[in-house]
Image (cartoon, rainbow, N blue to C red):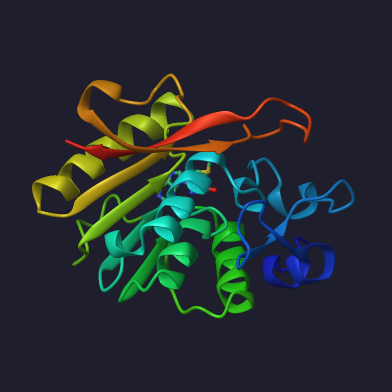
Amino acid sequence: MTPDASEFIRANLAPEPVPGFADIRLFSAHPGSGLTRIAGDRTPYWAYAWPGGIALAGHFGAHPDCVAGKRVLDLGAGSGLVGIAAAKAGARTVICSEIDPGGRAAIALNSEVNGVIVEIADDVTEAGVPDVDLVAAGDTFYNPAVAKRVLAYLRMCAAQGAEVLIGDIGRKDLPIAELEPVAAYSTREFGDGPNAPRRQSFVYRLA
Ligand SMILES: C[S@@+](CC[C@H](N)C(=O)[O-])C[C@H]1O[C@@H](n2cnc3c(N)ncnc32)[C@H](O)[C@@H]1O
């Protein structure tokens, strides 16, 4: 039987500080966490902080004015890092949308451990655009099929008046011609060890 995701995360992962963030901890993968027992065939994206999300979260911490008082959708939330950073920076409301049930369990635990309240939603891309001011998508251009679906949805969000910010380290499916750079942050690529060279990860606005 597949263990309950929430119980599994509590039992096998511990909230660890996210490098570069003094005030955010996430239940994160480690060599002994045995994630295949709940992730199965899915990649447990939610057990890691991705460089695109780190750039967005860092941006909200450095420029809280860009998020304070706003209704925010964190699309492809993974661990919930971006939504948690938005809430900490003063967002009025935050929805974290994540297609993976393990991710939704992690977001619930991560928001609790960071002392913020977020609404947790499954895939919203078929459900229209919620009433939000800002949509933030951290590292959602990681494969062509997801990139195509996410881009169509983000265009719809922008057409309906939401500001759309994307965090990305320069993945090949990023629609760079449609983006305006906003800021750059020094990050590590997923899977790089502590001695690997740091790389720039960017915050972009969908034009
Ligand atoms: C590479 S992870 C990035 C997670 C997080 N934003 C970060 O930067 O750390 C991308 C996430 O998008 C999620 N995802 C993919 N398609 C989605 C969809 N249609 N709706 C919601 N989440 C989706 C995946 O399950 C995955 O957790």
Q: Is residue 69 left or right of residue 119?
A: left
Q: Quadrant of residue 175?
A: top left
Q: Residue at x 41, y 64 (%)?
A: 86
> In the image, what residue occupies the spot 34% across and 71% down?
91
111 on left or right of 47: left
What count of labels does the image hold?
A: 0
Q: Quadrant of the N terminus?
A: bottom right
Residue 184 lies in quadrant: top left
Residue at the right extreme?
A: 32
Closer to the camera in the image, 58 or 45: 58
Asked where in the image residue 123 lies, by quadrant, the reply is: bottom left
Which residue ends up furthest to the front in the rendered image? 62
Q: Where residue 8 appears, x then y in whole percent? A: 77, 66
Image position of 132 with respect to 20: above or below: below
Question: From where the camera sits, is residue 34 visible?
Answer: yes
Instruction: Please state, as top left, top right, bottom left or bottom right, where the C terminus lies in the image.
Output: top left
Residue at 62% x, 31% y: name it: 189
Instruction: Identify the residue at horizontal 36%, vertical 58% (top origin).
Output: 63
Residue 192: percent from left, percent from top: 72, 30
| Picture layout, residue 182 above or below residue 101 | above
Query: Does 192 sit above or below residue 87?
Result: above
Query: Is residue 76 shown to the viewer in this render?
Result: no
Q: What percent of the width, then of the height, locates residue 113? A: 64, 76
Q: In the figure, is residue 160 to the left or right of 55?
A: left
